[in-house]
Every structure is written in C-alpha cells, then in structure tokens.
Amino acid sequence: MDPATLNMVYLVILMIFLGIELITHVPSVLHTPLMSGANAIHGVVIIGSIIVMGEATDMFSMTLGFLAVILGTLNVVGGFVVTNRMLEMFKKRQ
Amino acid sequence: MDSILPILYLIASITFIIGIKMLGSPATARKGNLVAAFGMGLAIFGTIFLYKTSSGEHLGNLPLIFGGLIVGTVVGWIMAKRVKMTAMPQMVSFFNGMGGACAALISLIEEAHRDPSATHDPVHSLTIIAGLVIGSVSFSGSIIAFGKLAEKIKDLSFSGQQFLNILVLGGVAVLSVMFVLGSLSGLTFLLVLCALALAYGVLFVMPIGGADMPVVISLLNSFTGVAAACGGFLYDNMVMLIGGILVGSAGTILTIIMCKSMNRSLANVLFGGLMSAKAAATGGGKTATGSIREVSATDGAVLMAYAKQVVIVPGYGLAVAQAQHICHQLEHELEAKGVIVKYAVHPVAGRMPGHMNVLLAEADVSYDKLVEMEEINPEFATTDVVLVVGANDVVNPAAKTDPDSPIYGMPILDVEASRQVIVMKRSMKAGYAGIENELFYRPNTSMLFGDAKASLTALVNEVKAL
C-alpha cells in the first residue's frame, strides 16, 4: 500500500470515531432530521459524478454520467430541502 | 491557484462535521443543515471550475454537467417541497436510493474507462467493486423501503428465502473477491454483479416488517455513505472520503440507537422477518378476544371536560387523517375548561423517531406539552382520561405480556394504568405491525370509531357545547 492510500486509511479510522462521537447523546426527537441531514451529506458522491462526466468522451460514459449527475443532485438538493422543512417545524416555537 | 480547490474541500469537510454536530441539538439543528448545505455548494462548484484531470486540463462537458444539476435541482426541490409531512420518511428513503445509484454508476463508468494494458491494482478494483455493490444494494433496498412506507409494497417472505438470500450474497462476495484479485474483469462482468447486488437489495428488505423500515433506511443511509467514500479513494478526493465515512459511521450508530429505543437488536430487526415467517404461518401470538365497549362523542367529551388531566396519545392514524390541527383545537377547548392536557409521544410514534413531534409542531402544539415516554409512563396512574388517536402498536400491552408477540420487548406507553382510555380508530383492523391489541378489550377502554378528524371535530363541538 502506498503512503497516500495509507494516509486515507488513517483518515477513515479517525472519521469513524468522530462520527460515533458526534451522534451519541442525540435526543430521539431529532433522529429523523439527523438521518435526513446525513442523507443529504452523503450526496457528496455527486463530486465523483461531476468528475467522470467532465472527463467523459464516449456515448456510454456521457449517458451514464449525465444520469449520475442528476441522481446525485436529487440526493443533495432533495436531502437538504426535506431536512430544512422538518427543522422549520422546530424553529417556530422557540 | 492549484491549492484553492483542496482548501475549498477542507472547508466543506469542516462544514459537514459541524453540520452533523449542530443537527444533534434542537436549538442549532436548522442552522447545522444550512451550514452543511453551504459546504456542499462550495465543493460542487469548486469541482466544476477548479478540478484538473491527471493531464492538467479543466473538466469538459460543462453544459451537460449544468444541465444535470439543473434537472436534479428542479425535480428534487419540487419533490421535497410538495411531499406531505406524513410521507417524509419514504422521501428520505427515495433520496438515499438516488445517492446509492449515483455511486454505482460512477463505478460502472470507471471500469469502462480502465486501461486494459495497465497493471492490475487491487486497491483500485476494491473501491470500484465496493462502490458498485454497496451503491446498488442501497439503491434497490431504499426503493423497496420507499414502496413499503408508501404502502405500495407488502411484506414478503417465502420458504427458502433465507437460503436464497445467503446464496445471492455469497455469489456477490465471491465474484467481488475474484474481481479484486484480477481474475475477472470487464464491464459485462460488472453489469452482472450489479444485477446480483440489486437483487440482493430487494431480497434483503422484502421480508422486513414495514414498522422496522426506519431502521432499514438508517442502515441503507450509512451504506450509501460508505459507497460515497469509495469515490473518495477512487479520485483521492478528501471531501468525498470524509463526508462519506462520517455518514457511514454516524448512520450506523444512529441505526443501533434506533434499535435500542425499540429494545431490540439490529440482527433481530434485519433477520427477524425471516425467522418469524414460520411463526406467523402457524398463527403465532395470541388473538385477543372479548367484547368491546363503544362510546359516543358526547360521552367522551363529558369524560374529558370534567377530568383533571387528559393525556393524548397521537399515532400515525392522526397524521393520515391530517387531524393534528383539530387535535390542537381540542387541547385548547379542554384547557379552557381547566383540564391539564399533555401529549405522550412514543419514541417510534408515527413512522420514524421524532416524526410525531414534527407533525404536532406543524399544528403549533407547544413543545413543552409533548412528553416523552419515560416521563409520562409514571403519570398514567394519576391520569383521568387517555385519548388514543390513531395509535395502536405503541399502546399494545402484548409487548409486555406476550412473549410470542412480534413486538414483545418493545417499551410501550402504559395507558391502561389510567382511569379511562378512549381509543379513536377507524375500525377494528390491526395496527401497522399486523397484530391484535388486547387493550381494546380491557374494561376501562372504550372505542370511538370513525375517521380521526371527524371524531375529533365532534369532540371539540361537544366540549364547546358543555
């Protein structure tokens, strides 16, 4: 394994612990919005689809890439908007 | 100039971490979501304009990229804005599936681009295959979960399914290992594997009961996170790696916490459907018998108006009937008569933890009136009237008394301890978990049949008239 890959493995391990740390002690009321928010964040996969789309030259990659960009955007935009709508409900009474 | 993009990625990664942290507290949750969304915007536009390919060129096909972004934004925005609050959980599942499909497509394109003359790189192959398999399972599983929550797909388990599941999963695993080792490759092979993984996603979610879908969605959510992180390895992209792993790990913990609040293990939720298939076939679980008592809206109103304390137990039925506003009105009328009104919110009331709170908040019910299960349970003994509106499984005493019941062990609201229970229901149909509820046959329980909204309206009018 080359050093760059190894560095990423280190990062993965740290992120796993950070993720656990961030979620523990969250009131159950917030589980749904939290899941929804996390759902929007993994929409970051769209970056990958933009990269493959930007490098695509053949019809196959172009078609699938275009589809991937649309699906990724759905994940990101839909995810954040839905989360925001849920959380708007909490805002009102504060 | 070249260092700008990595810095943007760094900022985006920090906003994800801070965003998740802020989502964990009611006061900051909304801001947290916006912070993460801002970071996501930075990462997306940074990539479009600043990313350089290995040959040092900027990305091409910009019109198509923007076209995809615009289509996705418009469709996603409209869907997210139009969806009813009651249908929120399946919407989340749907968007999660889209992310999974996106990750799978990326893997397919990467394999199509692979230079056949290059030496085999196991790490590269591993990330391609992991993104493909996990993304595909997450996609098909999420779509099934979506269908189940929308009640378009019924639970399905057949004999030999357990065997078939293991066979398909084993097939996926063996083929994946062969791909990583380099003995099999090519796009056609990957498409076959993709089809198998999609089939596994369907088989995996099909037997799991509809009531357990939130747990499944949370788990698939963390799957998609891991699939996204694979992209991070593929492109040495830190923000994909950090965002993906963070969601993968946080999502897993969230899944376990959700199981705990139902007092069950993750394994029981995931594979319980398969195990209980036989029990259900032989009619496991007692069927409640006895006579029920009906109460009219007039009598119900009198009972409540002269009570000292009334506790309302809202369930999904309330949400379906869109009755949260009229429920709030009933609370008002009762308080005007000097009655103390509280809401008892079970952790899994509605379709997801916190779902009911969102629905009641929509109707302006004050936050401090919503009491969580642990706090309200001791209070039932001194409560005069409990009004159960469209809830069923969360007040089913079988969870405590009947070890054969599928919900045995789930903590419930002890409404039976109160002096009088009024259950609002459309009919005697079983609840979401599909089991009988002996609470309805208890001597201190009376039923008020009808649509929740109509019944509540009748109650409000009767209370007003007193």
Image: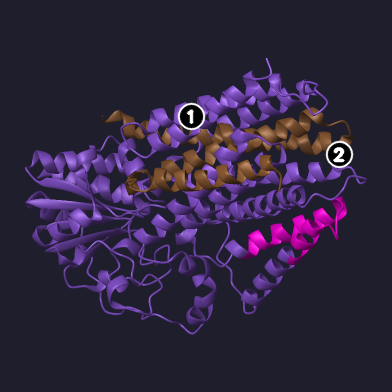
Chain colours: A brown, B purple
Residue that extends furthest to the bottom in the rendered view of this protein: B282
Whether pointer 2 and pointer 1 mark residues with C-beta atoms closer than 8 Å, the reply is: no
Is label 1 in a helix, a strand or a loop?
A: helix
Q: Position of residue B70 (x, y in %)?
A: 67, 25
Looking at the rendered structure, the kind of residue marked 1 is Thr
Separation (CA) of disc 2 from disc 1: 35 Å
Q: Which residues are magenta?
A: B174-203
* Dominant secondary structure (helix, strand or loop) of the stretch shown in magenta: helix
Numbered label attached to residue B15: 1
Q: Amino acid at mark 2?
A: Phe
* Residue linked to disc 2: A60
Magenta includes B178? Answer: yes
- Camera-nearest residue between B225 and B343: B225
Query: Is residue B46 part of the magenta span, yes or no?
Result: no
Q: Chain of mark 1?
A: B
Q: Residue furthest top?
A: B1
